[in-house]
Every structure is written in C-alpha cells, then in structure tokens.
C-alpha cells in the first residue's frame, strides 16, 4: 500500500542513489523518461536535482508545466526503464509504447507511474542558468509516497522480494539491484 | 592495481549512485568528508555535482583551492566513511582520527584516500550562486582511475569480493552494498 512519507524524510527515498523515472505533463500531453542523474539537494524544505537533456520531450513538458514526478522503479520494471530511457517521446506516447501505466499524482499535474515503489512530486525551482547551461533542474518536493511494505520509519526494507528492489543504472542495459543492507 | 579510466567514460564510476568521500587540501591543510549527494552532470568534458555544506571544513578548503577529489570507498571502509561523515574537520585531522591514509593525486593538490576503489580528480567550475544558495559544487573531472580488478572496459565487476563493493548510504550508519548485476 502507498503511504505518505514525511517531507523532511523524503530525501531518504533517493539517498542511496537509485535510478528514477521522470514523468511530466503539459497541455494534455504526457511523457516518461529514465534518469540515472537525480539526487537530493536539501532536507527541509526538501529539494532534488535531476538532469534533463535539451533533446528530450520531457524537457519541453517540464519547462511548460514547472512540475515533474520522480518515480522510483523496481527490478520488475527494468525492461520498461530501459525502453523509456532509449526511445524519444517526440511523436510517441511512451506510456502506451512501454506498457507503463500513468496514475494521477496528488499535488502536481504530472502523472505518476504505476507499479513504482516510491514517488516524489516536485515543483521546479526556476534557475534558468542551470537549466540552459547544464540541463540541470531543481525541484521542491511537495508530496512523497512509498510502498509501506518497502519503506517505513524512514528506511527502505528490501529484504523480502528481489523483484521489488530499486535499480542503479550503469549503461547499455546493465544495472545493479540495490544490495545487502548493513549498519556500522 | 589502479588504472586510468578514459575521461569520457568516467561518469560510469558514479552512475550507479555510490556514496563518496570528498578529499581536499589548501595551504598545507587537508580534509576528508563523506557525501551521499554526488552524481555525474555531463559526459564530455566530464562534470560532476556534489553538495558541500557551508558548515564543513571541506567547504573552506575547496573554495580556497578550487579542487577536490571524489573517492569511491568500498564496504571494507564503511566504518571510516561513517566516522568522517559525522565528525568535523574543524580543528581535527580527520585522516589521522579515522585511520584513512592520504595519497598524492595526479592532477590536483587535494589528496586521494588510500584503499578506495576509484578516484575522480576535479577542478571546481565556479558557479557562485549555486555554491552560496544551494551548497552545490560543479567539478570538471581532470583525471580518473579505478581498481582494474573491479572496473574494466567501462564497467564495474563486483562479483568476486563483497568487501570491495561500493556503498549507498541511507542514514544513521545504515548502508546498502551495491547488489547483483543484471542486464535486460
């Protein structure tokens, strides 16, 4: 079941460096792309960074709407992550072509991606120089949810189901799954 | 053995989102801190992002020198990573207090941290607004090396030795090790 994640703890969803799906919408159009280059930027109010290349359709939709969702996919979705990471959304509905299902988000107009294990809904903090020069976007997290079987009390618990582990993309369709948890 | 990594492939050292150690030096002083918030920003010339809080001694040294090294530590170093991530370098030599050993870098004055599995030597790309407003630093990677038993042909190979896997920090001394490799 999806459960709200306290905003000040939402950085923990991304702190271990998982690959994300960036979903967006504007003027009745929607898109989803994969991004390995996303991370937390601040705790409270929580902010995130994500690199969105100028060539992508996602870039048009994020700049038009000022919103995006970072969806954290799991190993069961790895093929779809590669697919939406390699084909362009220009002239194509990547939800339809990948089989990923859009779901309404709670506080932004961008859709969420069904079956992901966590969601960070974000509003763009406008930084035109970073966007233009580095393709770098800052988002303030305005809502966060996670699968409560996998994330509770501010921590991920991946032990039970390998198919539900988060992903760490390398290149060429190669990933690492999130591995063994340990404490020191 | 450490081997050079082609600069245009150096993003692959960080692409899977490992926690890093940031080492720095200026005017005969040196420091090392842990950072979970580091990622690639560009391929060629390769750039990286890292968040360095205003309260840290590392911040002073990086701003004074315009250089830092991102060192990728392994599971065998997890206790030291937590230690240099929790104590301050103000008035303390954290290399000495943690037992981490500084080694000369190749192209920057900042030291490297012995025993790490990869190194990205960086020169700061000055962006005063990002530094001041977001504690966000951009580095251009000017040299990259990795343990060639673990990284070759542009890919990590962690299968043989659990103690040599990279780390993904969560909070409160809790980590994930980098997990199973797979391709789709």
Image: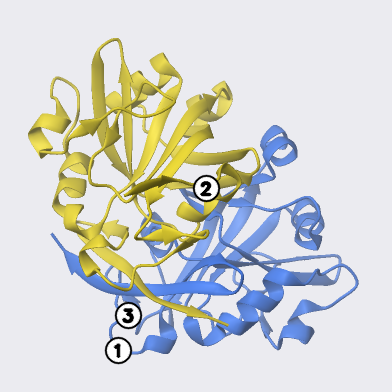
Chain colours: A yellow, B blue
* Location of residue B5 by image quarter: bottom left
Residue A29 located left or right of residue A145: left
| Residue at numbered disc 3 | B158
Residue B48 located left or right of residue A69: right
Residue B104 visible in the snapshot: no
User: Is the residue A184 above or below the residue B84 in the image?
Assistant: below
Image x and y of residue B68, in percent = 66, 61
A163, A160: nearer the viewer: A160
Query: Under tag 1, what secondary structure?
Result: loop
Mark 1 and mark 3 in contact? Answer it, CB < 8 Å.
yes
| Residue at numbered disc 1 | B160
| Residue at numbered disc 2 | A10
Mark 2: give few (<14), some (14-19) or many (20+) Cα within 10 Å.
many
| Residue at the image point whose x is 31% and y is 21% from the top | A25
* Location of residue B97 by image quarter: bottom right
B40, A77: nearer the viewer: A77
Residue sitting at the far right: B91
Image x and y of residue B151, in percent = 34, 75
Mark 3 and mark 2 in contact? Answer it, CB < 8 Å.
no
Discs 1 and 3 share one subunit: yes
Q: Which mark is residue A50?
A: none
A40, A101: nearer the viewer: A101
Image x and y of residue A13, in percent = 46, 53
Discs 1 and 2 share one subunit: no
């Amino acid at each position: 079941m999806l459960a709200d994640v306290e905003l000040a703890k939402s950085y923990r969803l991304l702190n271990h460096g998982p690959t994300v799906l960036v979903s967006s919408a504007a003027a009745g159009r929607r898109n989803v792309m994969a991004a390995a280059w996303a991370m937390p930027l601040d705790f409270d109010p929580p902010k995130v960074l994500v690199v969105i290349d100028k060539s992508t359709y996602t870039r048009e939709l994020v700049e038009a709407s000022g919103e995006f969702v970072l969806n954290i996919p799991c190993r069961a979705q790895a093929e779809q992550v590669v697919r939406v990471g390699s084909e362009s959304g220009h002239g194509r509905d990547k939800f339809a072509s990948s089989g990923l299902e859009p779901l309404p988000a709670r506080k932004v107009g961008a859709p969420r991606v069904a079956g992901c294990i966590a969601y960070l809904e974000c509003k763009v903090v406008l930084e035109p120089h970073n966007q233009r020069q580095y393709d770098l976007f800052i988002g303030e997290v305005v809502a966060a949810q996670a699968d409560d079987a996998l994330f509770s009390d501010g921590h991920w618990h991946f032990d039970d189901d390998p198919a539900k582990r988060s992903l760490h993309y390398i290149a060429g369709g190669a990933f690492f799954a999130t591995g063994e948890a340990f404490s020191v």
